[in-house]
Image (spheres, rainbow, N blue to C red):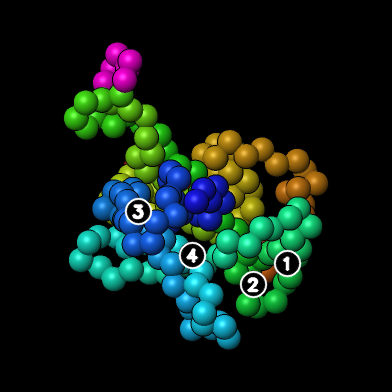
Amino acid sequence: MIDIAFGGDGATKPLPLISGHSTHNLGTQEIRLIYETIPQQIDQSKPLWIYQYRNSCEKEWNSFYAFSEHEFLDVDWEMVNFYVSGYMGEGNFQTRNVLVVGFLRGRDEGEGGGEGDREGGEEVIIGKRMLVNGVLKENLGGKTRVVRVCENEEERVRVLREVFGIVLLDEEIAGIRGRCVELRGERDGDGSGVVGERKK
């Protein structure tokens, strides 16, 4: 399974369709797929692949989503995308939050290193940065920390550009006005929004 758009707890590499086979993801996190039914199913004779994660081997597994082996066509994905991006009901997490995840790459300094790599170590995912509404967080394989809190749209647009490389057009910036996810706060003292770090 390859899922390029799930988010911060998504798989950072392809995951084999082997039920119960766990693999290291990021930091102490493990991920796996299990092939079972879910309680909401009417027909309990047809298992689904369930994506799960846990943040250490002592923790319980968390189930995030499930999928079948039925083929989806472009028109099926268009309908899913229409709901996810357009339905404004309270039950739709996607339209009620601004979510961006960027994975950070670095060298794996483990045994053996990468083949043909002069510096040793293979390039792997070493951490992630997440923007959740107006809060920029960072996790370098351990604990998540808050890096910055955006008080208004101008600050969030700057974080999107400077941290994630997402450059919005004026029309796109204006598109959030009046929506439930718009940041309407006042600018803080110097507009930096930096939390827990000294300003340079």
User: What residue would you read off at disc 1?
Assistant: 83
Q: Are marks 1 and 2 in contact (CB under 8 Å)?
A: yes
Q: Nearer the viewer, residue 75 or 161?
A: 75
Could you tell me how many numbered marks the image carries?
4
Q: CA distance from mark 2 to mark 4?
A: 22 Å
Which residue sits at x=66%, y=58%? 71
Check residue 117 for magenta coloring: yes
Which of the marked residues, 2 or 4, is nearer the chain's N terminus? 4
Point out the tag, 1 or 2, that comes first from the N-terminus: 1
What is the x, y in percent for residue 192? Answer: 49, 45
Q: Earlier in the sequence, mark 1 or mark 4?
A: 4
Q: CA distance from mark 3 to mark 4?
A: 32 Å
Q: Secondary structure at mark 4?
A: strand
Residue range highlighted in magenta = 115-120
Cβ atoms under marks 3 and 4 closer than 8 Å: no
Dot in front, 3 or 4? 4
Q: Is residue 65 left or right of residue 122?
A: right
Q: Which residue is mark 3?
A: 145
Task: Identify the disc placed on residue 49.
Answer: 4
- Across and down, in percent, residue 51 comes to 45, 62
Amino acid identity at mark 3:
Arg
Image point (25%, 60%), residue name: 56
Apparent side of residue 107 relative to residue 170 in the rendered image (left or right): left
Q: SS at mark 3?
A: strand
